[in-house]
């Protein structure tokens, strides 16, 4: 009986955990599966700045409006460049300046590209949509699947 209870409990825990728990409940942004593969290589001039802490790179062609990759010195983060508090439209594409990503819509939402958290004046309940990051040598792989 003890073994059966242990098996049922273990089975429940394995099915309850999910690898992809990032903003799945956001009704504004659709989930788009992508994988940058070897496209982000810090040996390439456009991504060379990602070898140094405090720098970011914008990568278009992935996600909805593109992705922003930031290097803090100890780790890389990657986020969607669409405002998570709007349905996708031309003004909801974010522009990055320093460590802040700003929305072009009337509400002027602002987000931190290191943490994905909204600035104090941001309207809405969601932070930036995070993506998975894997580093292997000079290759930074960003994916959402």
Image: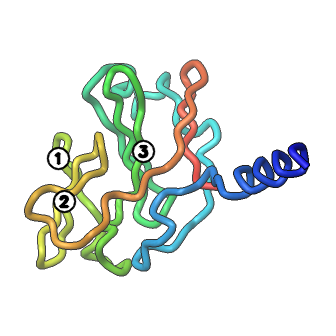
> Which residue is labeled 1 in the image?
97
* Residue 38, numbered circle: none
Name the N-terminal-most of marks 1 and 3.
3
Give the distance between the C-alpha atoms of the residues marked 3 and 2, in whole angstroms: 16 Å
Side (left or right) of 60 relative to 36: left
With respect to residue 90, does 144 lie above or below?
Answer: above
Give the distance between the C-alpha atoms of the residues marked 1 and 3, in whole angstroms: 15 Å
* Residue 102, numbered circle: 2
Q: Nearer the viewer, residue 53 or 75?
A: 75
Name the N-terminal-most of marks 2 and 1.
1
> Which residue is labeled 3 in the image?
78
With respect to residue 23, does 40 lie above or below?
Answer: above
Q: Position of residue 77 (x, y in %)?
A: 40, 39
Side (left or right) of 108 relative to 22: left
Residue extending furthest toward the front: 1
Q: Residue at x 76, y 51 (%)?
A: 9
Q: Nearer the viewer, residue 112 or 5?
A: 5
Q: Residues within 10 Å of mark 1 (few under 14, many from 20)?
A: few
């Amino acid at each position: 009986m003890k073994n059966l209870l242990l098996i049922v409990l273990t089975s429940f825990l394995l099915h309850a955990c999910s690898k992809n728990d990032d903003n799945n409940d956001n009704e504004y942004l659709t989930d788009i599966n992508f994988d940058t593969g070897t496209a982000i290589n810090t040996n390439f001039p456009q991504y060379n700045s990602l070898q140094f802490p405090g720098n970011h790179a914008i990568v278009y062609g992935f996600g909805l409006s593109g992705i922003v990759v930031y290097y803090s010195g100890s780790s890389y983060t990657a986020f969607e460049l669409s405002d998570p508090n709007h349905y996708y439209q031309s003004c909801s594409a974010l522009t990055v300046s320093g460590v802040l990503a700003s929305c072009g819509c009337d509400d002027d939402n602002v987000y931190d590209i290191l943490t994905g958290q909204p600035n104090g004046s941001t309207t809405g309940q969601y932070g930036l949509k995070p993506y998975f990051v894997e580093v292997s040598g000079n290759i930074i792989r960003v994916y959402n699947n």
